[in-house]
Amino acid sequence: MVFTGLTLEFAVVGFLFYSFPVIWPYLISELGMTESQLGMITAFYFIPVAVLATIVGRALDKYSVKNFMMAGAIIYALGLFSLSLINSYWSLLTIYLTILALGSIMMGNLAVAKLISNWFEKNAGKALGIAAVGISFSGVVLPLVVDPLLDLVGWRNVYVIFASIVLFIILPLIFFIVIDDPKTVNQVKDGIEKDNEEEFTPQEMTAKDLLSKKIFWIISLAFAFQFLSMMGVLAFLPVHASKMGLEETWNLFGFPIKQYVFAYALSALGGVLGKIIFGYLMDIMKAAYPSMMAMFFQAIGIFGITYFNEPSVFLLSAFIFGLGFGAATPLMTACYLRAFGAHNLGKARGISSPIVSPLQPIGILITSILIGFQDTYFIAFNIMGCFALVAVVLASQIQETGINLSKGN
């Protein structure tokens, strides 16, 4: 289940986001788009996702995760193939906001988180962290692969390749591997048998119940600001690195890799390690501590890439930035899981989406607007670093006494 979740995260986030900035120069030169317009694509994408997540999240608590993932994979593949046919900015925007938004939410992180929570409890932090490695690992691999591939086959055929991978590899993987619940194959969560007296039926919560919990709002807002900060920097990192002078082309394992693309990939590599490290810490520490550490690393990384253009320092800062933001998704899911249980995870994640998702694109919007007035990311990235520090303060309020339904907090 964890391996399948990792693979799905790789395909959804990698094909939709990490590959996108590498393709920007081709969309700009061939279709006349601008950096600001392309940044807006990612920002607007989160609007339909916020709406769809509330519906899909509730449904995942009631119906088959496997069926949702399979339907989502088909829709997602169709959306990727449609990108190979676009001829205008508006067609690109429409596909991102409709077909890709629906497909990605049905087979992506929300569905993966529900699947993992069905299989793990004690080791949920590590399991969620490992599954989420696919998110950042896609950022390590795909920019390095897509960059030379664009010159070989063209950006349209790259999207055809992406769609084919989803249809002929991801879809069969879901069909043959995914099992909704361990009980259906005579297994138990974590592989650990519990005494009968330890078994309990989790309390099913309504949307009103969740929204009345202070801990729900603290978790949602803390990670909303972390995502806001992350998206305002990550989407523009390759272009910013280029403007900072990282233009040299290196030869890496026989591939010509641009320095600014390597910086982008290095931040994703930090994200891979962040998911594993902080996922492990989540299982052995109070929820506030790994959350605060990850957000603080993100802030330090952002300020580093903003103020330093010396390649070694810039690349180290990009890695630290990734170490922090990479932990965001598994930590957020683990916090909701610890607070409300697997039985309510889909609903909690879904209802939180209208809180988290609208804030996510604000970072992109701020950066997009500011870059439209000046040819530097200095002011925008400083603002994003401050938002990461706001997230640290909010995360410090995640108290263990609040992460217990029996105490009514």
Image: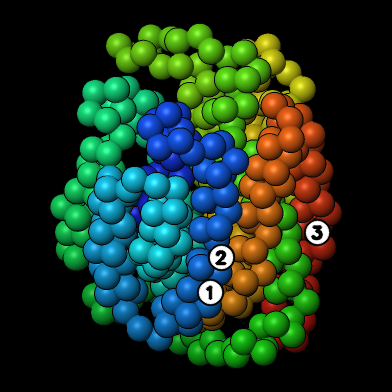
Task: Quarter of the image for the N terminus: give it.
Answer: bottom left
For the residue pair 105 and 156, the one nearer the viewer reads as 156
Residue linked to disc 3: 394
Residue 335 seen from this side? no
Which one is in front in this view, the residue at disc 3 or the one at disc 1? Answer: 1
Rounded to the nearest angstrom, the CA distance separating label 2 from label 3 is 24 Å
Name the residue at 62% across, 13% down.
245
Task: Determine contact: label 1, label 2, CB under 8 Å.
Answer: yes
Name the residue at 55% across, 69% down.
50
User: Please, what is the three-letter code of the amino acid marked with disc 3?
Assistant: Leu
Name the residue at 45% across, 61% down.
97
Q: Secondary structure under badge 3?
A: helix
Rounded to the nearest angstrom, the CA distance separating label 3 from label 1 is 25 Å
Residue linked to disc 1: 51
* Residue 334 percent across, percent down from the top left: 58, 63
Residue linked to disc 2: 47
Q: Badge 3, how many Cα within 10 Å: few under 14, some, many 20+?
A: many
